Image (cartoon, rainbow, N blue to C red):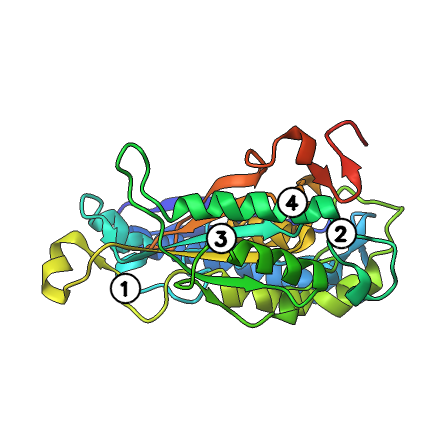
Amino acid sequence: MTMVAAFVVSMSGSSTQATSWTTSPNKTRMDHENEMWNTMAEDNDQDNSNSDDGEIWQGQVLKRQLYTPKYPYPLWDYDWDGRMTPETTLEAQRESEEEPIVGTTRHLILIRHGQYHEHPKSDQEKTLTPLGRMQAELTGRRLAELTRKTLGGGDACPIKTLYCSDMTRAKETAAIIAKHLGDHVQMAMPDPNLNEALPAPIIPVRPDIDAEAEIDANRKRIEDAFQHYIHRASGEKASTANSKQENQQEERHEFEILVCHGNIIRYFFCRALQIPPEAWLRLSVFNCSLTYLVIKPNGYVSCRMLGDIGHLGYPHSTFSMHHGFVWS
């Protein structure tokens, strides 16, 4: 019998450890992968269990605030949303590689609110500026175009629901956008879980931002919001093309819009693409920009737009109170 030795390198603090095990031809490729991933996940758990509550990891950030993925980067967690089915495991997809998974594809368009008055103390007074209202109007017009067929005959985008945070600037932006979308789009109640806050540690570190207490107070809420909104379609069973006729499953597309905030959008983007969420502040999303995520029935996630402001034009482009691009 041929025995093959496999190795994986895991990082524990400042030391590098090699974990090894033997594999057998009697095991499937999925058995080998599960053994490898489980070993690395156990290494991560062991590493985290040894950390002190106030330990500064690598001299940069609080270790207890770091997000710990189920499998170490850059591996993909195929059950990242808890909705994986027998048909959407990696092994099943490899065995049916010529039979695409069919079902509902979710299209999520995340929009940062328009420019607003930042100096008042109460949220109720932090209303959109005149420019912020114009940004929302232009965004509504662009989204309305999605509901019509393209000149080349492309299908219209069936926008289903418009969500927003419970902060004044997001609610005002959403209300302006909603006027352009028609009565068929459901306007959901504002959700405070989408409210702005620092969602995760910042790497590279920003010494000018006192983040520790705010992250502790909000990271669970923001992670809960991510799990609530960002997932593959619910209430149905994805299937392969060969079984499509048997269960009458058809390929469908649903579009939903979330009007919220820059930090929330950047955190959702990183988590959805399984990028370390501590990288969120390396991204920049302007007021009324569009970040467009696609979640396929097999759980794969892709980004079609990040912070797109093509509909605004340079004269209407702002990042908070900064106009245009010439600022630091």
The residue beneath circle 3 is 180
Name the N-terminal-most of marks 1 and 2.
1
Question: Measured from the top left, where is residue 66 in percent x and y?
Answer: 69, 57
Is the residue 102 above or below the residue 237 in the image? Answer: above
Q: CA distance from mark 1 to mark 4?
A: 48 Å
The residue beneath circle 2 is 116
Q: Residue furthest top?
A: 326
Q: Amino acid at mark 4?
A: Met
The residue beneath circle 1 is 86
Name the N-terminal-most of marks 4 and 3.
4
Q: CA distance from mark 1 to mark 2?
A: 47 Å
Is the residue 140 above or below the residue 314 in the image? Answer: below
CB atoms of marks 4 and 2 within 8 Å: no
Q: Amino acid at mark 1?
A: Pro
314 displayed left or right of 9: right
Name the N-terminal-most of marks 1 and 4.
1
Q: Nearer the viewer, residue 191 or 234?
A: 191
Helix, strand or loop status at disc 2: loop
Is the residue 114 above or below the residue 34 in the image? Answer: above
Residue drawn at (31%, 33%), measured in percent from left and top? 151
Residue 28 seen in this snapshot: no
Closer mark to the observer between disc 4 and disc 2: 4
Residue drawn at (53%, 49%), measured in percent from left and top? 140
Name the N-terminal-most of marks 3 and 2.
2
Closer mark to the observer between disc 3 and disc 2: 3
CB atoms of marks 1 and 4 within 8 Å: no
Residue 113 seen in this snapshot: yes
Q: CA distance from mark 4 to mark 2?
A: 11 Å
The residue beneath circle 4 is 134
